Image (cartoon, grey):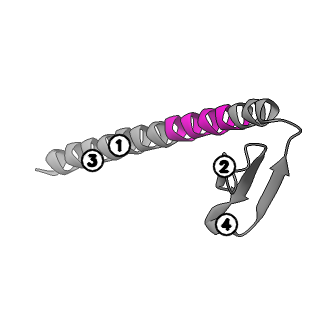
Amino acid sequence: MQIGLTPSIRQDKRRFAVWTANRAQTYYFQSATAVIRTRWVNAINGLLMRQLKILREASRSSRTNSFVADHERHSLMRSETTADF
């Protein structure tokens, strides 16, 4: 599920929002102070950035594994074809 963060809402330094893909669901939060809001926003942003990094690494790993498997499959096909001649 894709999740996004809007760090401030309507110029209120105490409010922020967390939303799902295409803003299907939006959750609004209001902290007691702007300092607390900043802490929450930084913590949530850190979590989202770590999640993005993990997903990107997994995607790269998947593409690399797919490339290696394709290369091995093509090498095997070439060696079988060559053996027939």
**Magenta-span inclusion, residue 20:** no
Q: Residue 4: x and y, percent?
A: 64, 52
Label 2 with label 3: CB-CB less than 8 Å: no
Q: Earlier in the sequence, mark 4 or mark 2?
A: 2
Looking at numbered disc 3 in the image, what kind of residue is underneath it?
His
Q: Earlier in the sequence, mark 2 or mark 3?
A: 2
The secondary structure that dominates the magenta segment is helix
**Vertical comparison of 19 with 25: above or below:** above
Residue at the (54%, 38%) spot, across then down: 58
Could you give the CA–CA distance between mark 4 and mark 1, rounded to whole angstroms?
35 Å
Distance in Å between CA atoms under marks 4 and 2: 10 Å
Q: Earlier in the sequence, mark 3 or mark 1?
A: 1
Residue 5, numbered circle: 2
Closest to the observer, 3 or 28: 28
- Amino acid, disc 2: Leu
Magenta extent = 44-58
Q: Nearer the viewer, residue 65 or 12?
A: 12
The answer to whether the residue labelled 3 contacts the one labelled 4, judged by CB atoms less than 8 Å apart, is: no
Identify the amino acid type marked 4: Arg
Q: Position of residue 7 (x, y in %)?
A: 66, 45
The residue beneath circle 4 is 23
Q: Considering the numbered disc 4 on the image, is that residue within a helix, a strand or a loop?
A: helix
Against 38, is 70 above or below?
below
Q: Secondary structure at mark 3?
A: helix
Q: Are marks 4 and 2 in contact (CB under 8 Å)?
A: no
Q: Which mark is residue 17?
A: none
Identify the residue at horizontal 63%, vertical 38% (top origin).
Answer: 51
